[in-house]
Each structure stands twice: as structure tokens, then as C-alpha cells.
Image (cartoon, rainbow, N blue to C red):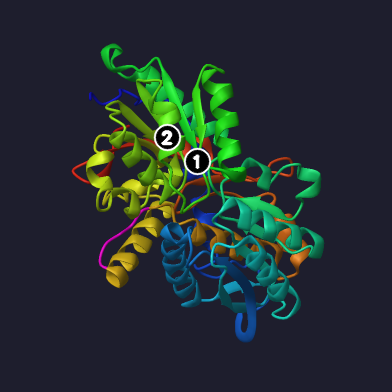
Amino acid sequence: MSKPALSRVQLSRRGLLVATAGTLFTAACGADDERDSPGPTTRGSEELIIGASLELTGPGSAHGVLQERALRITVDTLNEEGVPVGNLRRRIKMIYRDNGSRPETAAQQATELIQKENVHAMLGGILAETSLAMLNVAQKEQVPFISLGSADGIVTPLTARTYIYKLQPNAEDVARAMVDLRNNLPEKDRPTKLGVIYADGAYGAAGIAALRRAFGNNLIESQLPNTGNNVTSAVRKVTNERPDAIIIWAQAPDSGAAAQAARDSSFEGMFIFDPGAVADDTLAGDNEIAVRGAYAIHPASLAGTSLTDTTMADLDRRDFIYRYIQKHGAFRGFAPYTSDAVRLIANAARLGRSVDRGRIRVYLENLITEGIAGSYDFQPIKHGGMTADSLAVFQVVENAWIRVS
């Protein structure tokens, strides 16, 4: 399959963010900022307390474990100097919880983190359902919450989500990138008959709605069962119609299972994955042959960094990757959203010169910054997610995700 010609020359919103917001990215762990920290900056016992409920076990663990690794590295980095908040440098106290990929557990943990641990902010919920469970608690208790999940309903309606933010790309932006991918393929490789296999729940619902708007309503659709169940029947509803390409909108491990079931059903066409598929699990074991040559839309951070990167954000990204390799042997660029989440909270506390929950919320609402995973442009009328021009196209080549645009 030929590679799509997707490169464009443009002054993008992301380019402006890189140029103008790099210092904000590092402000929480850099030198003292006299403008925002009146009086002498001293070390104290006070802490910035953040609670994290992550999917370290269960269906969401393919991403959850990697996000925990990213979070621990970033917290350690920030704590080397502390976060300047008012006239103190506060250490970040992270409280980690494993929600087991269960929404009811995530909700219970959110309540305990707020009422017993007195956290100043929370992050977590890699699965849409765990995020939705946590945000209900966070909104009621008026505690800033940064979701790691991917469903547009996490931050809408905004009137009921005033304390809620999300980092993952919006479904509409991913779907548009898939349209661009299809349209920029050589004409002989361009699929015309599209199948869509999508996850159950809020995550898949957001995806299929965005794909219908982007591609029209002539898609061949099938919804996957709950994670852990046999996907063969759902996949064959699509492969029996003999599409040219299949979009798989699901998180690992479901993404690889669906691709393998499609190949077992004699499907020989192209796969296009959404960002949720991009994990080691999708390329592991029997999936390796099934997904060979598949495309994926994913934040460009998956490609790592270059020695020629010179912006403050680039330098922080390089430092993060270096620390990750030191600790874990190899960099896994599966969008370290937790790293960005804790930095955003730290920056909001620094700019607001307070760990007051309401002030953190207000300053989060106006942050424009370049992070490890991508760029963010929060506004009072927009609480997520990543900017569209943070996305890139990758292809599975020799059992690795290689950027092709």
C-alpha cells in the first residue's frame, strides 16, 4: 500500500502554540517567577495534592499502566524543584488508585479522594465509563478533574461540566483526519466501500457519530460486544459485505481482536484505527500479522522527538523521553496524557498563586499550552480536547508504528 501524501505547508494553530506557550509548559518546574510569586519563594511542607484513579488492571490496563509510568516520571521531575505557588514551593503529593476498569470503583475512589484525602484536583478515567463516573462526583463536589478518556460527552454540556476537562483528541477531529487519509491515498488504493467496527458504550458512540458526519451515512456498521467477549459475530456483519477498508474505533485489546477476526473472515483490505488502538497489545502475538500495514490516527508524540527540537516544549519532551527510557528500557509514545494533566494542574496552581479548587478551575479554563502528548487550547466555552493539528497518520511497518505524514 502506498503511503498517503498528507504533508501541508501552513501556519497552524499548533505552530503558534509551540511558539508562544512553550514557557508555560515548563513554568511549574523551572525558575522562580517573581511576577506570579510575590515575595521570597521558600520551601515549605505544604503540598499540591492530586488524586489519580487509573485502570491499572482490567480491560483498560493496556493504556492505564503506561499512563501511570508517565505520571510518576513527571511528578518526580516537578518535585525536584517544587511548584511555585504564591510564596511557597509546593511538592506534588500524588495519591494513586487502581479502579480495575470499573466505573463504580472509580466513582467511589473519586469520593474518597475528595472527602478523605482532601485533594486539590483529580485526574484519571482512561475508559469513557470510568471518566463519566468520576466527573459526576467531581462536578458535584466542585473539584477540578482532568479526564484521560475519549468521549465527547465528557465535557458536554459545558453548563454541567464546569469543573471538567479532557485531553484526548475530539472524535470529530479524528474522523476528519481519517477522511484526509482516505482522500490522499493514491487513487488505485483509495477505498470507496467502508466498514466500521466500533466499541460499545460512550467511546464507540462518539466515534460512530463522528464518522457518520465525516463520511456520510452509507457506512457498513457493527458494534462490538463488551470487552472480553467473542467479537467474531460482530466483525462478520461487516466483512460479509466485502468492504474495501474497515475503520476500527475501539481501544486495545479490542482493536487487535477485531482485526484478527476480520482476517480470519478472509478480509484482505485496509484497516484504519483510531488512537485507542495504538498500544503494544495491538501489535502483540497473533495480532502482528493481522494488523501489518494498518493505518492509525494518533497524536504526533507517538513518533518521539528529534535532537534538533529547540522549543521549550520540545526540550521538556526530550527530557521526559530520556527519563522514560532510563526507567523502562524503551519509550512507549502512547500519548502520555497523565504527564500533561499533572503539568496543567501545576501550572494552574502557579498562575492562580493558590491551591484553592475554584482558582485552579478558573486558570485551567484559560490555559493554552504545548504538552508532551500534544497541544491544548482551553477556553471558557471549550474544555477539551487536544488540538486537531496535534494529530498525525501512522502505519504499522515491521511491527512498529511509523509516522507517514
Answer yes or no: do the residues labelled 2 and 1 have beta carbons within 8 Å?
Answer: yes
What is the x, y in percent for residue 306?
28, 49
Which residue is disc 1 drawn over? 224
Which region shows up in magenta? 329-333
Q: What separation in Å lies between label 2 and label 1 (alpha carbons)? A: 8 Å
* Principal secondary structure, stretch drawn in magenta: loop
Three-letter code for the amino acid on which mark 1 is drawn: Leu
Front position in the image: 365 or 245: 245
Sequence order check, earlier mark of 2 and 1: 1
Which residue is disc 2 drawn over? 235
The residue sitting at 70% across, 50% down in the picture is: 365
The residue sitting at 73% across, 40% down in the picture is: 381
Three-letter code for the amino acid on which mark 2 is drawn: Val
Front position in the image: 375 or 262: 262
Task: Indicate whether residue 27 is drawn in magenta.
Answer: no
Asked which quadrant contains residue 324, the reply is: bottom left
Front position in the image: 281 or 141: 281
User: Does residue 212 lie above or below 384 as drawn?
Assistant: above
**Considering the image in quadrants, where does the N terminus appear?**
top left
Q: Residue furthest bottom?
A: 45
Q: Is residue 35 visible?
A: no
